[in-house]
Image (cartoon, rainbow, N blue to C red):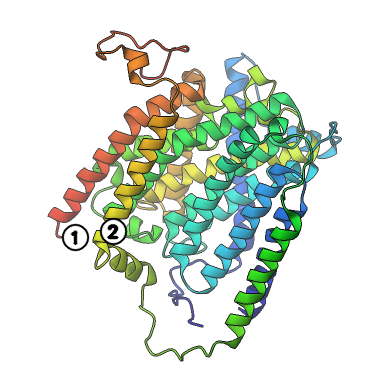
Amino acid sequence: MTVAFWVLAAAAVVFGFGVFRLNSMAQVTFSLLASFVAVAGLVLLLGLSYLGVVIVLMMVIEMVIMAVFMIMYMMNPAGLMPMAMYHNKPGAMAISVGTFVLLATGILLVDWPRRTGAPAPDLTFALGRSLMGEQMLTMMTLGITLFATIVASVVLATGRGRYDRLGDDLDAPRADDPLGGGVGR
Amino acid sequence: MNEPMPIPAQVTLPWWWALLLPLVLIAAAWAVTAFDAVVTARTTGRRGGFAVPAREVARLLVGQRRRTVAADPVLWRAGSAVLPVAAVLAAVVIPLGARPVADLGIGVVWFNAVEVLAWAAVWMAGWGPNSVLSLVGGYRFVAQGLAYELPHMFAIITAALGAQSLRVTDIVAAQHDLWFVLLMPVAFVVFLISTAAMAFWGPFDAPVAADLAGGAAAELSGADRLLFSGGRWMLLTTAAAMAVPLFLGGGAGPLLPEWAWVVVKTAAVLAVMVWARRRVPRIRMDRWTEISWMVLVPLTLAQALVVSIVVLAQGGL
């Protein structure tokens, strides 16, 4: 347990630092992914298996998509040339190291309370109960807000919407697509 | 620090199965490769094909590593190596008979999380060699991933919903009276389709297609190529084997022991996939995205709704 904790903790920090040291955008992305996977391992060590595995699932998908977007939008053509991953190096370094030191001293100095309750027998179930029980309204509001944001951003970003494809009254018999196929509407 | 939940000893296989599992998976993938080679040989009017996997493995093991200009060797090698590792990790929750190697309480989520590593693997293998064709192949797989992943998750979660558990052995137990393939046929079909897309197999092999001279695998050679294509076969085998506990009642069946039924059912699923690859023309991932999101996502959601109503009507939760 303790060995696993230290190995994962060291891996999380080393890969996290790699994000600033490596000079390829692709390597940086996967270094960040490795750091997150190590954090997911730490969450698993806490006995929160569902959360830990979901972190892996989400982070892999997210990082691969992020790699695509980062490379697409960076000023450097296709991200293929080596480049430094930091701007304002001294400032960024001061802020990150300062934050780390602050948090670490906080963790070490705070007088943590003793545990009083016992963990639920099935933590995944307890988490589901908590999210879908008392916090249902919050979660629903949050979910709908997030979903509305996604839809709105897609609508704003889309180059060719349904009116371009199917005419102003959406009554064209065939969609006007640069490439045919799909469901053929 | 609280201890993880104790797992009853009889539920999981003995610990040394963890060492045996990669070998079992390699043997199974080997058999599928040989079967596929035999079918290929027959369609071209030749005999044999059994020796193809052995010959390929031997050829790739002694093959030289190809070098490209300004490659990214770290990601390139990692991409090839991650595929077989992901396949083995995904297989630990599959019951080989009555019991899996690890009976995780969140088994189906684990399976899904590990197989998603294929996204990273194929993209890294495509990115690594600094070659246009393989880079295009890597991007193709990411696009395809976005298309298949949502229906895939909904199909898996529908099976979990029917059993009201994320534990794979619970899902098998819940099919005691009725196999889920009958209760949720749409989810089963979508699972098979999205599985083929996940292993870039069958009509979904555009990421490694011949029009890109091999796509993401274009510049792979030697041991790297062996890991990549072997890993892909292992991933396909694992995903097909997962259809058995999720939808086909696990090891349930008359006469034969449970492990034999798992083998028979897995072989049947794989035969369907080998057959489908030869019957269905390759589909472009942008077309597939539209079909997947416009047709399969609503279908799987409707399927999940039907299953939820059935579960509630039976007095679940």
Instruction: Please determine whether, in this image, residue A74 is positioned above or below residue B176.
Output: above
Residue B91 screen position, x and y as percent:
53, 53
- Do the residues at pointers 1 and 2 share their chain? yes
Query: SS for tag 1?
Result: loop
- State the count of labels: 2
At a point 58% along the width and 48% down the height, the residue shown is B87
- For the question of whether residue A134 can be seen, the reply is yes
Residue A135 screen position, x and y as percent:
27, 65
Please report contact status of discs 1 and 2: CB closer than 8 Å, yes or no: yes
Farthest residue, direction top = A173
Give the residue at mark 1.
Answer: B316
Mark found first going from the N terminus, 1 or 2: 2
Residue B164: mark: 2
Chain under numbered label 1:
B
Amino acid on which disc 1 is placed? Gly
Specify whether B100 is left or right of B33. left
Residue A32 screen position, x and y as percent:
64, 54
At a point 85% along the width and 31% down the height, the residue shown is B69
At a point 62% along the width and 39% down the height, the residue shown is A70
